[in-house]
Amino acid sequence: MAGTEREPAYAEATRALARDPKRAHALRIADVALTCCGYVVYPALLAYLAIFQRWLMPACIIIPALCFGFITLLRMAVSEERPYEKGLPNVLEKDTHGKSFPSRHVASMFAIASSWLLVSEPVGLALCIAGCAMGIIRVLGGAHYPRDVIAGAIFAFAFCAIGYAIAYAL
């Protein structure tokens, strides 16, 4: 239509998901499952380190915690509205206002993945893939814009890479 702007493809997909209760429910389950994955694999990493590589444990606690803290402060400072606050359906049924940029869920998954990459490349890479899937789910669910999840992933990965490089240098 002349004079109207076409919605991005992700917005069209979000609206389609919102109209399909079964797919919307599946998206919510996938979001919860991936979030729970982080709650399981991070303590598993710390347990592994406590047994096999105790010297890495302080860095693998401090660096992800600092990353999480910086992401939280950045989100509060920017306080960007979420897509569902601007008219997209809220498929994930969130009620948070603002704090969309960057995605803390995705940043956390990439911080955990970065930590796992130190001890197991296959697990770390699998978690990077899980982080990408989480980002897609968060966008399709109406909780974040693509830039939010991309920024969260890049920030966490870069922050942790620099942090671990410094920790290894010490």
Image: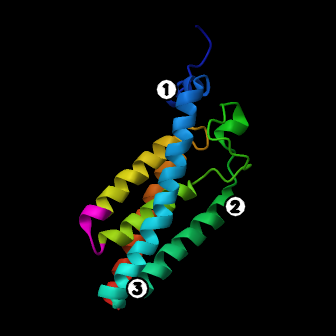
Q: Amino acid at mark 3?
A: Met
- Check disc 2 and report the residue beneath it: 76
Q: CA distance from mark 1 to mark 3?
A: 42 Å
Residue 11, x across and y down, in percent: 56, 29
Q: For residue 9, which numbered disc appears in the image? A: 1
Q: Earlier in the sequence, mark 1 or mark 2?
A: 1
Q: Earlier in the sequence, mark 3 or mark 2?
A: 3
The answer to which image quadrant residue 123 occupies is bottom left
Residue 155 visible to an observer of this rendering: no
Residue ID at (44%, 70%): 42
Residue 134 among magenta residues: no
Write the start and end of the magenta stretch as one range. Answer: 118-123
- In the rendered view, tell whether residue 31 sits above or below residue 78: above
User: Mark 1 and 3 residues: CB-CB less than 8 Å, in contact?
Assistant: no
- Check disc 3 and report the residue beneath it: 57
Residue ID at (60%, 27%): 21
Residue ID at (25%, 62%): 122
Q: Amino acid at mark 2?
A: Met
Q: In front here: 56 or 153?
A: 56
